[in-house]
Amino acid sequence: MPFSAAELAAAGRRAGQDGVRLVEVLARPDGAAASDDFPARLAATVGLTCLTAAELFALAPDFDGLSFDEALRREALLGRDAGGHTVLAVADPFDTDLVDGLGARLLHPFVVRLADRDDLTACLARHEESRRVMAGMLAGREEATTGDAGEDLSLRRIAGDASPVVKLVNSTLYDAIKQGASDVHLESVPGGLVIKYRVDGVLARVGGVQGTELAEQAVSRLKVMAELDIAERRVPQDGRFKVQVSGRPIDFRVSIMPSIHGEDAVLRILDKEHLTRELAGLTLETLGFDPGVRQQLRHMAGEPYGMLLVTGPTGSGKTTSLYATLSETNTGHDKIVTIEDPVEYQLPGVLQIPVNEKKGLSFARGLRSILRHDPDKIMVGEIRDAETAEIAVQAALTGHLVFTTVHANNVFDVIGRFMHMGIDPYNLVAALNGVVAQRLIRVNCPACSTASEPDAALLRESGLATPADVQGFAFRAGSGCGQCRGTGYRGRKAIAEVLLLDDELRDLIIARAPLRQLKDTARRRGFVSLREAGLQRVREGLTTLQELNRVTFVA
């Protein structure tokens, strides 16, 4: 028999309180193991046909349509049955984001079927074994054809290093990779060196070195690895090197900057295998956008021509959002060309061009050449100057769909930024489909977050001074544990504001109307600001007011 409305309501309340999925509460309402008839009851409740284990294992998987990594994460499998029909087997029928996302990027229809969670796990495990065998064969082939593998980093190798400088540098790099840092900062201070990692967008001090001589030797060691001039200490230098960790190559981009106490070094970590895994499951859902923003992004990405602009500060995930949008809309029927600096993700079926300023390949020059390559969709990594902006606008006006980023604080500042570059307002609004401004906020650690009540001072600082302002808020905060390295946060999600241009807004921009008038008009059309989007995440208990105040203005 299906679950009753009362059972569903009670399970929904408990799922909201515990921060777990509804299907998990329904499966184990009293904390015990799921009953044998649970799949049948769930199927009867949602009106889906339940697959047997034999039917599930007989499906020919389609990991191009639904990547293996995403299948593991979402407990689902996309495949074809004996009749050639596309079937999506899910353990969680309430995961509507998965169904909607596949519906947006698949050209052919598919049917949704329910499968037992344990059967799905076993089925995916079997496919994982075969994938590992293939990966091992490919890895062996790569090793045979490539000689520049880079230095091997391992605990055994680090322990055997005789030089204290080499041991210091190698152990720092190894530890940063294991902690999932995006950057390593080595800052010269009077008497030594301070080492910091950037994890989830926030810098944290992890150690230091006493003695200026050892500090200088550490920076010189990095210069040697990046093939830079160790004798030059007066001008900035940029380079790169590669290491091997657990058999996978990892790139480091190095920037050396002179300071009053010596030289500072910043290393950007690019784990290609990790990026590839991310890309395999990269969708607008996984980035954390709310359903309204996802719908608007897909709408703009589905237009036949025009320009989609994503704005935000450095490290706010602009390029990643464009990659996700391109991945969802890449059906193979369009010619897609990108020009980036650098190319961080490799998109299958997409021509990707890296900027090379030293050789004269700038964004502007590359974009001019791209237009002669008969593209349908173009992604420009960043608009930095008036020439690139002019070419991108002209491309959008001549029948191309242009995805690009620009540095600005919000969607309205973008308009002023382009006008400052000398772009004609009429051409800009004619080309522009919409603007997205985004930020990345850290989310509460699921392992240690509990209900928490912020103090009155924090509420006032956050613009929530009255009881009515916090009505409906489920405040939560992490206390810090081993899984989140004591920070109380683990992972990041995107928040965004979207400005869709219509005729009235276009007229106001052409007439150079005051900013207040633009904002009022946009709000009448349902515009939701970054701050409001972030407050909704706080209301849901996904993050804290402190984190929201860190990345957005209180307005």
Image (spheres, rainbow, N blue to C red):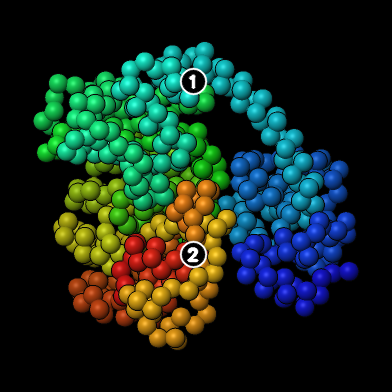
SS type, badge 2: strand
Instruction: Kindly indicate the quadrant of the structure image that contains residue 20.
Output: bottom right
How many numbered discs, if any? 2
Residue pictured at 72% horizontal, 53% vertical: 90
Q: Is residue 81 visible?
A: no
**Residue 367 image position (x, y, % from top left):** 29, 42
- Report, in whole angstroms, how far the alpha carbon at label 2 lies from the one at label 1: 39 Å
Q: Could you tell which of marks 2 and 1 lies nearer the N-terminus?
A: 1
Instruction: Kindly indicate the quadrant of the structure image that contains residue 371.
Output: top left
Residue pictured at 28% horizontal, 76% vertical: 518
Number of other residues with Cα within 10 Å of mark 1, as a class: few under 14, some 14 to 19, many 20 or more: few
Residue 156 got which mark? 1
**Residue 74 image position (x, y, % from top left):** 65, 51
Name which residue type carries label 2.
Answer: Ala
Residue nearest the observer in this picture, 369 or 338: 338
Whether label 2 touches label 1, CB < 8 Å:
no
As drawn, is 4 to the left or to the right of 13?
right
> With respect to residue 118, does 167 lie above or below?
above
Number of other residues with Cα within 10 Å of mark 2, as a class: few under 14, some 14 to 19, many 20 or more: many
Residue nearest the observer in this picture, 32 or 242: 32
Residue nearest the observer in this picture, 312 or 177: 177
**Residue 325 image position (x, y, % from top left):** 47, 52
As drawn, is 24 to the left or to the right of 419?
right
Residue nearest the observer in this picture, 42 or 46: 42
Residue 477 got which mark? 2
As drawn, is 443 to the left or to the right of 6?
left
> With respect to residue 256, does 113 lie above or below?
below
